[in-house]
Amino acid sequence: MSSDLVGYDDFLRELKTRISSAQLRAAIALNKELVLLYWQIGRDILQRQQQQGWGAKVINRLAVDLQKAFPDMKGFSPRNLKYMRAFAEAYPEEQIVQQPVAQIPWGHNVRILDAVKDPTERLWYAQQTIQNGWSRNVLVHQIESQLYHRQGKAITNFDSTLAKPQSELAQQVMKDPYSFDFLNLGEEVLERDLERALIAHIRDFLLELGVGFAFVGSQYPLEVGGEDFYIDLLFYHLNLRCYIVIDLKIEEFKPEFSGKMNFYINAVDDLLRHLDDRPTIGMILCKSKNKVIAEYSLRNMNKPIGVSVYQLKNTLPEQLQGKLPTIEQLETELKTVSVPDKFNGISFTSSSKIKDYPIPTREEVEKAKERLQKRTNRMNFSESEIIEEVAKMQKEI
């Protein structure tokens, strides 16, 4: 039908874009009004408590009355009213509320209030949420990983090798340390295994790297002087408009690492970089680093290089390393433990070992009885029947 009307498809596409944009603006405006309303309610509660001596119980009373007056409107629970009060206390100036925190959903603000105490840090997370489009779960992850304290902290030579504002933008892209807590790896890991694990969890890896990173390849081949060389990880940064070479090291940073990275950057600039691409950046990710040695190694280098460390989730504080039992030690110890004579209503012989019976919780015992009743139409069961049923349930999990 559109073929009968010249330009109809373009017109329809334009209308769809305009409607979608209007819907987005309306949603943003609605969210802003809601957050501002919550701030005003919190401010008024706070003022009356301070000036007129209203006690904490007024919040419960307000919750009942507001829910009665607005039964179709969510958000007036005692818990949420307390958050409104805390919100107004955290941001005493209305001008602040009309800027970043009013542009993010209320649920995001609640998470920031719960987890972050410093006012500057709170505003930073609100601004990053707007800039990067973080969902609530991503925001929580970034707060838990202490992103505020890691962002822009890598040791680099960007000030001397990149022009502004590229140098400042590149510095903010780099973190220290990088958190690879999504990898199920121990401390003793080969570089190739670490690389494979990062690629297998590429979505989580890209989230940790930050907005703008596009994956190009792993073990990316480059031919230089008739010889083959391989880059551990190659990315292209959409905002910086440049290639980023990542070299993984499972050891402490050494000065020679920067020389190797300098070689990779030169090769990428010559073989891959286009005329409209900006200078390639190198990132060396190590297990650990000496700050002074890293700074000396980058001094007078004419290629932009950053040095950061990574952390795995199995990393323990030094004072605990060597003091906790290994898995093998725990397994050996468990084999020698006897089950109590009676556990959640089930009798065991005193010589029975944990490995011989599933250890039922009270809930599992009741669930096992329910399953047996449905299957047999009986009400009473022997302990062995219950134990066998619990074992079946545990295997089904």
Image (spheres, rainbow, N blue to C red):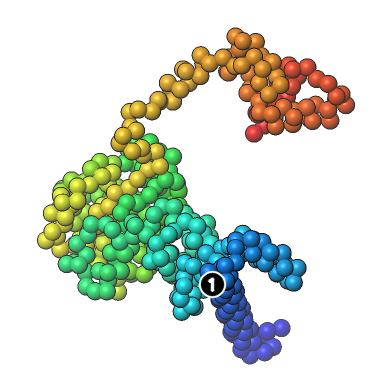
| Residue positioned most to the bottom | 6
Q: Work out whether residue 264 can be spotted.
A: no
Q: Residue 117: image x %, image y %?
A: 43, 59
**Residue type at the position of mark 1:** Gln
Q: Residue 342: image x %, image y %?
A: 67, 17
The residue located at (31%, 41%) in the rendering is: 191
Q: In which quarter of the image is residue 147?
A: bottom left
Q: Quadrant of residue 75?
A: bottom right
188 above or below 264?
A: above
244 above or below 35?
A: above
Q: Residue 42: image x %, image y %?
A: 56, 70
Tell me how many marks there are: 1
Which quadrant would the N terminus be assigned to in this image? bottom right
Does 131 sit left or right of 290 as displayed? right
Q: Residue 169: image x %, image y %?
A: 30, 69
Q: What element carries label 1?
A: helix
Foreground residue among 52 and 296: 52
Which residue has dot 1 on it? 51
Foreground residue among 391 and 204: 391
Does 320 sit left or right of 4 as displayed? left
